[in-house]
Amino acid sequence: MRRNMDSMTAPLPPTLDQVFMALADPTRRAILAMLLEDDMAVTDVAAPFAMSLAAISKHLGVLVQAGLISQEKRGRVKWCKLEPDALREASVWMQAFGQFEPIHLDSFERFLAQELQSPEG
């Protein structure tokens, strides 16, 4: 029996690691913020950044691989669209940490300052 080659080469869904890796870069986060407003042409996405179109295209590729955006060609122009559902798994994962009490860093800093100032016995 012959297998369908399309099913063997279909892209795997993005992993949580890919999503967080994509979000780790400030340029990619800025691009996502821009796409919150509306779909944008690649050249419009690149306009506010002081980098080459090739560099922006690499950032866009990372965002596509992470499933955070999609791209489609409309005529001669390639458009980028935010895929907000891609952040759902990351959001659920991060919300699990919201159940803990917030750390009181001011109290911790005061404690450290006292410990560092006190003479060792």
Image: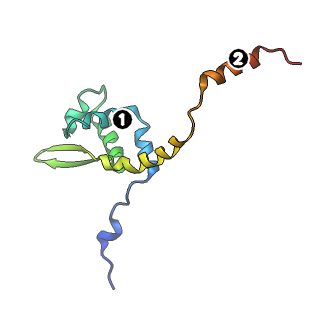
Q: Is residue 28 shown above or below 107?
A: below
Q: Secondary structure at mark 2?
A: helix
Name the mark on residue 29: 1
- Residue extending farthest to the bottom is 1
Given residues 108 and 62, the one toward you in this image is 108
Please give the name of the residue rendered at 39% of the width and 32% of the height, measured from the top-left corner.
26
> Quick check: 29 above or below 73?
above
Query: Is 88 placed left or right of 83 in the picture?
Result: right
Residue identifier under label 2: 113
Measured as percent of width and height from the top left, residue 74 is found at 12, 47
Viewport quadrant of the N terminus: bottom left
Residue pushed farthest left? 75
| Whole-percent x, y for residue 22 in the image | 40, 42
Q: Residues within 10 Å of mark 1 (few under 14, many from 20)?
A: some
Give the crowd class for mark 2: few <14, some 14-19, many >=20 residues within 10 Å: few
Amino acid under disc 2: Ala
Q: Residue 25: where, in percent of width, then height?
A: 41, 35
Q: Is residue 83 above or below residue 31?
A: below
